[in-house]
Amino acid sequence: MKVGWLSVFGLATAITLTFIFIIVIQQQLPQQGFLQYPINMTLVSIDEDVGQEVSATLWGQRQLDLIVLAFVLFATATCCRVMLRVEERENA
């Protein structure tokens, strides 16, 4: 039985990644300031009119949303075209 190098490489990579995953899981991850108080750096005012402030923040990022949406639609159309294209057969 012939063993391919790709299978050996895949097995070695899987074992290495498993060991790295186990080592990372065993280490205690530090809290990186997620629970620090007082919270004084917020994007919106949390006193009054929370809905209007959140809406203004989201509409302020609308350009980025449109660029990402255009890319997703282009990628979707390209993938659909590739899947549905008709391939010509070679007459031998």
Image (cartoon, grey):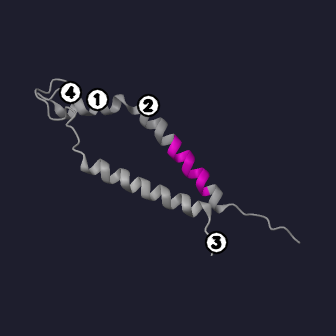
N-term-proximal mark, 2 vs 4: 4
Q: Residue at x 21, y 44 (%)?
A: 28
* Tag 3 secondary structure: loop
- Residue found at the very far right of the displayed protein: 92
Q: Is residue 1 above or below residue 56?
A: below
Q: Quadrant of residue 90?
A: bottom right
Most distant residue in the top direction: 40
Q: Are marks 1 and 3 in contact (CB under 8 Å)?
A: no
Crowding at label 2, few (<14), some or many (≥20) Cα neighbours within 10 Å?
A: few
Which residue is denoted by mark 3 in the rendering? 2
Q: Position of residue 78 (x, y in %)?
A: 61, 51
Query: Of tags 2 and 4, which is closer to the observer?
Result: 4
Q: Nearer the viewer, residue 41 or 9?
A: 9
Q: Are marks 4 and 1 in contact (CB under 8 Å)?
A: no
Write down the region rendered in magenta: 71-80
Q: Nearer the viewer, residue 82 or 56?
A: 82
User: Label 1: which residue?
Assistant: 56
Q: How many marks?
A: 4
**C-alpha separation, residue under disc 1 versus residue under disc 3:** 63 Å
Q: Nearer the N terminus, badge 4 or badge 1? A: 4
Residue named by callout 2: 63
Q: CA distance from mark 2 to mark 1?
A: 13 Å
* Mark earlier in primary sequence (3, 2): 3
Task: Point out residue 52 in the picture as x, y percentages from the top left corner.
Answer: 22, 31
Mark 2 and mark 1 lie on one chain; the one further toward the N terminus is: 1
Which of the two discs, 4 and 3, labels the residue nearer the N terminus? Answer: 3
